[in-house]
Amino acid sequence: MLLRIFAAIGAAGSVLHTLIAGQTGNALETTGILLLRFLEYFFGAHIAYVLVMLLSTELFIRKSKPQEKPSKFWLWHLHAVADLLCFYARADVSITGTELIPKDTRYLMVANHRSLADPVVMVHKMPKEELTFVSKPGNLKIPIIGKVMHKCGCLPLDRENNREALKTVKAATEYIDKDYASVVIYPEGTRSKQEDMLPFHAGSFKIAQRANVPVVCVALRNTDRVIHNFPLKKTNVYIDIVGVIDAEYVKEHKTKETAALAQGMIEEKLDAEKKKESAAAKC
């Protein structure tokens, strides 16, 4: 949002300069020139920003250097890029239930996984929450994106390698214990290509159990439609924070039970919204 405001201010300045310089003709020509100048500067500023970011990642980020904690500098830029992606992808994102997010403690946030856009919309709509993500190891190998994820403290989770998975759980727990960030994970383990959710992996909840923190449950809707609708159609995306499982419950119950409870809360919300959509379609 802030980046778009700066670009708009700069574009307005360019328009003002055009007026002062007297580069005007009749009313139609004037309108066309001013609009062109505004768009030229607005989009040019965004392109310049992205190019500078791409160059910076190549020059200054070394993934071989361990990242002890998420970089606030790169987290700020992650939010800026998420804002731009949602803006240009025409994703109109709404969020409910933010009042449920714990204010006095870190937490583990879990959500259903529908699309690559899931973390983007979550970062976009929760700018005040210091979040870092647990992701597939392959995502951190993506050129440029992987480097930014590394600096933002994103952690690779190899579910096929128990030893490496345990390292990730320990690292995520440390982020929470040291108050560096709250952690987001998608317990399905991969994107669900069907309407129904995949079973939650109970191991994902070991992070909350070890750190003795609550679990924030999030239902995501329509993120899978963003790419299909782009660029001709706007997509209404919904983030619903459906509930919080308190730390005491997480501590006293098996991770399998916590996983079942979290998935049930999310599925209940998704099913309710699906019924509303079906009823509305019949009207």
Image (cartoon, rainbow, N blue to C red):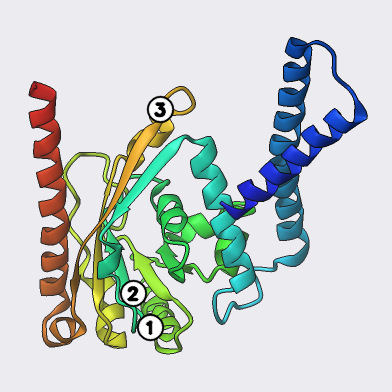
Q: Which residue is mark 2?
A: 162
Q: Quadrant of the C terminus?
A: top left
Q: Amino acid at mark 2?
A: Asn
The CA span between labels 1 and 3 is 38 Å
Between tags 1 and 3, which lies in front?
3
Q: Which residue is mark 1?
A: 173
x and y percent of residue 152 in the render?
55, 68
Q: Nearer the viewer, residue 99 or 216?
A: 99
Q: Of marks 3 and 2, which one's residue comes earlier in the chain?
A: 2
Determine the secondary structure under disc 1: helix
Q: Amino acid at mark 3?
A: Asn
Q: Nearer the viewer, residue 159 or 115?
A: 115
Between tags 3 and 2, which lies in front?
3
Query: In the figure, residue 42 lies in which quadrant?
Result: top right
The CA span between labels 2 and 1 is 16 Å
Q: Amino acid at mark 1?
A: Thr
| Disc marking residue 135 | none
Determine the secondary structure under disc 3: helix
Q: Nearer the viewer, residue 220 or 103?
A: 103
The CA span between labels 3 and 2 is 39 Å
Q: Residue at x 49, y 36 (%)?
A: 89
From the viewer's perspective, is 42 left or right of 181? right
Is residue 146 visible in the rendered image? The answer is no
x and y percent of residue 222 in the render?
30, 39
* Local crowd size for mark 3, using a 10 Å CA cut-off: few (<14), some (14–19), many (≥20): some
| Disc marking residue 229 | 3
Is residue 171 visible in the rendered image? The answer is yes
Q: Of marks 2 and 1, which one's residue comes earlier in the chain?
A: 2
Q: Residue at x 29, y 70 (%)?
A: 101
